[in-house]
Image (cartoon, rainbow, N blue to C red):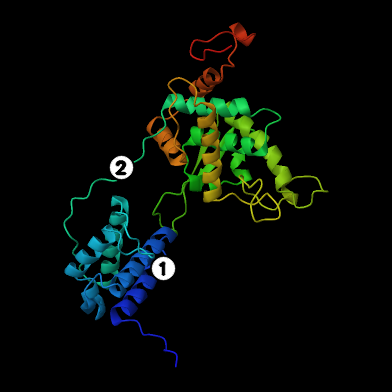
Amino acid sequence: MADGPTTAPPAIEALDSLVERACKPPTGTSRAKQLRWIAGELRTALERGAIVPTAADSLDTLLAPDTLATYLTAAERGLLRRKPAARPDQASPASMRIRENCLRILGARAGITVILPDHDRPQVALRPVIAARPRSILLGHLERSARPDRSASRSRILAIIGTVLDTGCRAGELCALRTDDVDLHHGTIRLTHLPQHRNPRTTPATRTVTLSRSTQAAIRHWLTIRSHLVARDPTQPVGPGNETTDALWVSIAPSGHPRPGLPLHFRGLARAYARAIHDLNTDMAAEPGWHPLPRRMEQLRRAIELEPADPTSRSQQARHATGTHGGPEGGWPVSCRRCRRW
């Protein structure tokens, strides 16, 4: 005779109900995922005996100081992962801070004073940013490889990186861009500010940023390619009335889909950027003094925040990086010591 469904302990039932209430707006999507993750770990800790069995009696005993101290120790040692490992990895300081913050949120919602162990956790170290010189080489590499016969993927990544260099926007803000946010007549782009942990009920702030000439040219060329990718009916003229989406960045050759032109989301954007950086690191591997660039866009974006770029200066740096700047009045190419090429 088959066993019937088991009833969850009182503490887990109360915890699940508490988490559902805590995940409602104005709680953001990311924070809601974190709260459910912590609830799942507490459930796993009970099932695996990582915390005392009496913690299952009530929410108060589950969130008691001794229980939470034991839970955090097990989580830090990697003992609460879904698939137990022979040699579990140590949890990162960032993930431990998320656990502690979520426990405080749940305690506040339940009216329970949450007392956490007094750990002197190390500060979360940010990855180093990309310096000015490698940034100019990055743009120059893309401009050299992005000519009138360039591929659609090269055109897209050139426009994306140019936008990041000019605006310092986040990946989520890039994905949220629409074609009507770009005004090439005035050379500007309108960004919707989407900070982390924002209140979803709050109207996002917008700002208009002037684009450099190289970025304007890159976006103009990308828009031409994009218009064919998103055409609803290929037999009809391309334009706003014949598009499947108004997203500025769209897929080129999506896997698992019958056609391109789908809105580009965070993971697709990250993969496209990583591919471009991989190509650059491969091409520049033999260059003296070259250090491989990181494959995360976040390190490029934070470099712009720490050291805002002057569009005029950046264009000049890009010309030096590509070795394409001219001689007097731009009439002929000259040798440049910085570029060491004609």
Dividing the picture into quadrants, the one containing residue 142 is: top right
Quarter of the image holding residue 215?
top right
Q: Is residue 2 left or right of residue 17?
A: right
Q: Which tag, 1 or 2, sits closer to the chain's start? A: 1
Q: Which residue is mark 1?
A: 24
Q: Is residue 20 left or right of residue 104?
A: right
In this rendering, the answer to whether 137 lies above or below 15 is above
Left or right: 286 with respect to 19? Answer: right
- Tell whether 296 sits left or right of 190: left
Q: Is residue 176 visible?
A: no
The disc at residue 125 is: 2
x, y percent for residue 232: 75, 52
Above or below residue 200? Residue 254 is above
Q: Amino acid at mark 1?
A: Lys
Q: Residue at x 32, y 64 (%)?
A: 80
Q: Residues within 10 Å of mark 1 (few under 14, many from 20)?
A: few
Amino acid type of the residue that numbered disc 2 sits on in the rendered structure:
Ala
Residue 190 visible somewhere in the drawing: yes
* Label 2 Cα neighbours within 10 Å, binned few <14 / some 14-19 / many ≥20: few
Give the residue at x 52% y 20%.
321
Q: Where does the image place residue 105, in percent across and percent down from the top left? A: 29, 64
